[in-house]
Image (tube, rainbow, N blue to C red):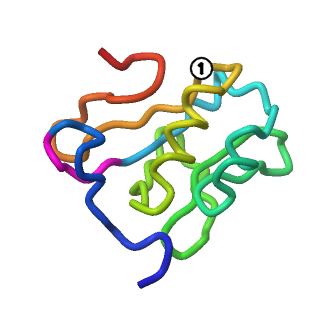
Amino acid sequence: MTVQQEAPAEGASGTGDPLEVWIDQDLCTGDGICAQYAPEVFELDIDGLAYVKSEDDELLQEPGATTRVPLPLLTEVVDSAKECPGDCIHVRRVSDKVEVYGPDAE
C-alpha cells in the first residue's frame, strides 16, 4: 500500500469516514507549513501557492481539487490545517462533505 492509498481516518471525523483535504489558493499565503508537515500530501508550486497532490504524486491545480487523507498522515494533515497562517486548508468527510478541521469546521 502506498502512502496516498485510501484509508479511513477512523475516529477523526467521529464516524470512521474517510477524509479528504483541499486548499483555497485565494487565501494561501505561501508559507509552506503544510508542505513541511506533510510533503506527501501538499506541495508549493512555482506560483508560490500550496496545492494538494494526487495518490500518484501529481500536483492538483484545479480550484477546489481534493485528495484523500492517508491514515498514516492524518495527524500531519490536521496539524497543517491548524497551523496554516492563511486558514486555507480544509479537511472534510468524504461521505457528506462536512468540514471537520479547518476554518469552516463546526
Position of the C terminus, as image quadrant, is: top left
Q: Which residue is mark 1?
A: 87
Q: Which of the pair 96/13 is nearer the observer?
A: 13
Q: Residue furthest bottom?
A: 1
Q: Secondary structure at mark 1?
A: loop
| x then y, percent, for residue 65 | 47, 47
Residue in view at x 30 percent, y 53 percent:
9
Callout 1: 10 Å neighbours few (<14), some, many (20+)?
A: some
Q: Magenta segment: does it hold 4? A: no
- 23, above or below 62, in the image: above
Q: Main secondary structure of the magenta part?
A: loop
Q: What residue span does the magenta drawing correspond to?
A: 15-19
Residue in view at x 47 percent, y 39 percent:
64
| x then y, percent, for residue 87 | 59, 20
| x then y, percent, for residue 52 | 58, 51
| x then y, percent, for residue 96 | 16, 37
Position of the N terminus, as image quadrant, is: bottom left
> What amino acid does circle 1 point to?
Asp
Q: Which of the pair 11/58 is nearer the observer?
A: 11
Q: Which of the pair 58/62 is nearer the observer?
A: 58
Dividing the picture into quadrants, the one containing residue 24 is: top right
